[in-house]
Amino acid sequence: MQVQHNELIIYHSLNVIVHGGRGTPGEVMRRRLCFSLDLVDDSELIAEYRRLHEPGGVWPGVIDHIRALGVEAMEIWQSGERLFMIIEAADDFPRPVTTQSLVETNLRWERAMDRFQRRLKDAAPGEKWSPLERIFLLAEHKGARELI
């Protein structure tokens, strides 16, 4: 993969590709990561998965693990069976998580989520979420008024 000047590529222990945006000198950069995953085609399981992701549904230790990695914001969006996860990460993401209880809690959560999730065919071995590649950035394009 060729790396353009406005992207940062980082591999962490889960082999996730991190894409960064443009920054200005002295600015602390946050990186946006986007991923996709499919849910099992079962309306009851999908409803339960959604319920588990409502406020208070995700185990507190999982939330602590996510934040310990340097994730500053995370959203999961759904369209039918397809999920899209958007993460805003700190410049030093991924931070090593040394608290064993957080690591173990996160592993238990991931195992619990397995029954709901289907890996996409392009997912890396051992990975659930497939990284998305940005193919369009509005700031890189000129509109008709800018061309005059």
Image (cartoon, rainbow, N blue to C red):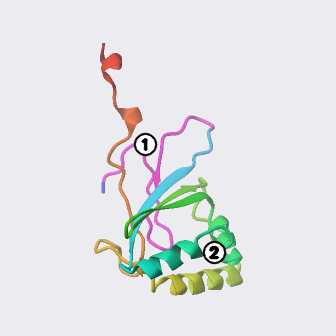
The answer, for residue 142, to whether it is visible in the render is yes
Q: Quadrant of residue 148?
A: top left
In magenta stretch: residue 17:
yes
Q: Total number of numbered labels?
A: 2
Residue at 62%, 66% in the rendered image: 69
**Residue at numbered disc 1:** 6
Residue at 62%, 44% in the rendered image: 28
Percent coordinates x, y for residue 59 in the rendering:
67, 77
- State whether residue 50 is above or below residue 71: below
Foreground mark, 1 or 2, reads 2
Q: Nearer the viewer, residue 68 or 13?
A: 68
Alpha carbon separation for disc pair 1 and 2: 34 Å
Horizontal placement of 61 versus 2: left or right?
A: right
Q: Which residues are magenta?
A: 2-26
Q: Mark 2: which amino acid?
A: Val
Give the quadrant of the N terminus.
bottom left
Query: Which residue in the rendered view is the most extreme toward the front?
Result: 44
